[in-house]
Image: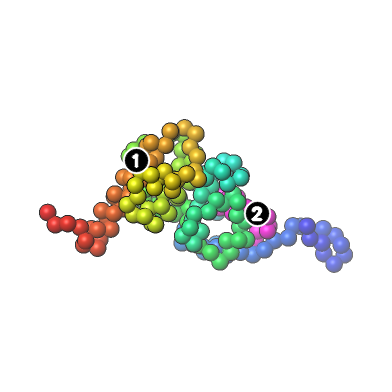
């Protein structure tokens, strides 16, 4: 709470932040206690950031901050000042699905879809760190995310497919693929 020189309440204390969200700089006045998830959803209109538990347990709110996954329900918007944030909405380029999103679609790795954004963002970090993960590494890499609908098998298959596709694309782009 803030008061003016007469002691009258003059509204909540705010701080100006500038965050680069999906490549776009955004400057906003925010209350210091505003959660990053609420900032992304309400101030930026990015509804792919879901809030399931508000305790960092479910992973639905997972985004990347400076290339590392964070649970946005556990972070404050002011902590993202000057940083780069990527959400599931920022993965697709030119209206095309990102290979991870495409793999989730092709393998039916979702039912209600509530958790999907968090899984996609966690899978992105996993594949960036380990382009050829084993099933065990995928299970471990996604262990911080919960899906109450699917049973996980299609999610794991989606990540395997995405890793294969991204590896094949990288080989094609760099010319390191095998000649037939």
For residue 126, above or below residue 174:
above
**In-front residue for pair 62/97:** 62
Residue at position x 25%, y 61% from top? 173
Earlier-in-chain disc, 2 versus 1: 2
Could you tell me residue 9's position as x and y percent?
A: 82, 58
Where's the N terminus, which quadrant? bottom right
Tell me if residue 82 can be seen.
yes
In this figure, which residue is indicated by the disc labeled 1?
157
Judged from the image, the secondary structure of the residue bearing numbered disc 1 is: helix
Q: Nearer the viewer, residue 44 or 77?
A: 77
In the figure, is residue 172 to the left or right of 67? left
Q: Measured along the vertical axis of the image, is residue 101 above or below residue 85?
A: above
Which residue ends up furthest to the left in the rendered image?
180
Question: In the rendered image, which residue does mark 2 sit on?
Answer: 34
Badge 2 local density, few (<14 within 10 Å), some, or many (20+)?
some
Residue lying at 39% horizontally and 47% vertically, measured from the top left: 137
Evaluate whether residue 10 shows in this view: no
| Quarter occupied by the C terminus | bottom left
């Amino acid at each position: 709470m803030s008061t003016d020189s007469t002691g009258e309440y003059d509204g909540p204390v705010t701080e100006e932040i500038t965050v680069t969200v999906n490549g776009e700089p955004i400057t906003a006045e925010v209350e210091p206690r505003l959660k990053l998830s609420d900032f992304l959803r309400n101030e930026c209109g990015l509804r792919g950031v879901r809030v399931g538990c508000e305790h960092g347990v479910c992973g639905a709110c997972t985004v990347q901050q400076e290339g590392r996954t964070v649970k946005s329900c556990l972070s404050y918007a002011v902590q993202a000042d000057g940083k780069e944030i990527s959400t599931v909405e920022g993965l697709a380029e030119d209206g095309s699905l990102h290979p991870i999103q495409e793999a989730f679609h092709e393998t039916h790795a979702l039912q209600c879809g509530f958790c999907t954004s968090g899984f996609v963002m966690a899978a992105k970090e996993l594949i960036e760190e380990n382009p050829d993960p084993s099933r065990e590494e995928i299970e471990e890499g996604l262990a911080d995310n919960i899906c109450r609908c699917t049973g996980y098998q299609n999610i794991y298959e989606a990540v395997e497919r995405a890793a294969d596709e991204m590896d094949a694309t990288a080989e094609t782009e760099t010319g390191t693929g095998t000649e037939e």
